[in-house]
Image (cartoon, helix red, strand yellow):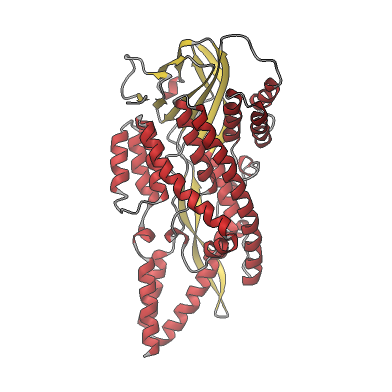
Amino acid sequence: MASRALTVLAICAIVQLTGCAAFRSYDSELKETNQQLASGNVDAALVLLEKNNRSADKDLLYYFEKGELLRSKGDLAGSQSAWRAADTVVFKWEESVKLDTEKYIRQFGSFLVNDKVRRYEGYDYEKVMLTTQMALNMLALNDFDGARTEIKKTHEREATIAELRDKEYLKREEEAQKQGVQTAYKDLKGYPVESLDAPEVVGLKNSYQSAFSHYLSGYVYEALGEKGLAAPGYRKAAELRPNTPLLEQALLDLDKPADKSTDSVVLIVVQSGLAPARDSIRIPLPLLISGNMVITPLSFPVIKEDTSTPRFAQIHLDGKALDLTALNSTTAMSRRALRDDMPGIILRTSVRAITRGVAQKQINDVNPLAGLAVGLASAITEGADTRTWRTLPDDTQVVRLRIKQGEHQLSLPSNLGGTQVKIRIDRPYQVVALRVIGNQVFAGGPAVQVPPSATPQAVASLTQP
């Protein structure tokens, strides 16, 4: 009787884990959404997002994606509202970490639950880029004080993440030794190790600090006359992206006397492409289960780079070519995040497989049919977590220049449709933000005007309604 109860409980537990979250293909959902976005049909992209998120209890990813889609549509207020909801979720995460870091680490490091059925908490770089994107929304409206608030939040968030990860990685190493599990991803035969060991990935200090975020903070503080706060922002950006003339020059310019000209200091921000997807691949791994070495196929995440948008390094202003400086790659940050997380993923996946194998053997000894059912359910639910913020821009490039106030014309390369956008400069410091996906250009804020002659299919305005 007891054995039968054990069997029923085991099956029920497996059935619960095979709920919607376990079967959801986030990559497929967002592939459709991003196809609509890349074609300029933002409304259709929003309809798909709502269709795939019908639950009243919206998760963090929903607010991430909705904020970026509304920003592309031109609804900056709606975008900011969605991102405020996301920021509230992240804030609660921060508070739980600060309240009891050890408890959080124990809960997140649980071996019993597959990563893809956990409540999504966002990757560290997503949490930091959230407030950076919110600052850009504010700057599109020339609200430098509002942007300052988001920037301050970014710095505080980075500090929380840094402290947590130091403790988590130490705990993980101790647990790996205790469990006797090898956690080096280079030992996974057939895994694309080179993607995690690429120079642009290994060269990052961590997965969450962005040279763009820190440069933007320096620019905002400088515009507000707070040079003492601007310097650390520029210095950190230069540390994260060494040998970058733009960053080194920003520090030097802070020490120069104030310019008496009436020209404006303009920062043009061009964000292109889409964040990479995550996919799941199976790798056979030898595991010691009930005293026997068993070759077990286990699932691990891999990064799939987005190819929707051609790369470019120049734009034109009033017919003059301007070289862009790359300050952020979401693909590199995503790969660095996975590189840092892989030991923990291997540990959790391996221990879960061993525990499941032992339990299945015990059930099979009592009831072979139940053991088979549990084995089938386990095989179905086995898979890596493929959720990630997919509408987040991939590359962020900038150019900073002094130009006269008035109207100017920006144009993008011909391989992006040669799109032309008019901008109006009327502030001492001003940010012009462009978003490029495929050959679509989304441009935001009152500084940007789309010429009437522009092809509607090629340009979607982000100006406020």
Which residue occupies the foreground of this view, 452 or 360? 452
Q: Is residue 95 left or right of residue 383?
A: right
Residue 463: image x %, image y %?
A: 37, 24
Q: Which is nearer the eye, 121 or 226?
A: 226
Residue depicted at 56% across the width and 22% down the height = 399
In this rendering, the answer to whether 284 lies above or below 291 is above
Q: Give the left or right position of residue 230, taking residue 313 as reference.
A: right
Report whether 240 appears left or right of 279.
right
Q: Is residue 111 left or right of residue 253?
A: left
Can you name the residue that lies furthest to the bottom here?
1
- Front residue of 293 and 137: 137
Image location of residue 417, percent across then percent down: 40, 22
Residue 64 visible in the shown view: no
Q: How many marks?
A: 0
Residue 178 drawn above or below residue 58: below
- Which residue is at 54% across, 12% downward? 403
- Residue 293 spot, x, y in % from top left: 57, 75
Identify the image quadrant of the N terminus.
bottom left
Q: Is residue 359 above or below residue 196?
A: below
Name the residue rendered at 56%, 11% in the picture.
263
Q: Does 49 appear above or below 298? A: above
Do we see residue 343 in this rendering?
yes
Q: Quadrant of the C terminus?
A: top left
Residue 418 found in image quarter: top left
Viewer-closest of 252 and 289? 252
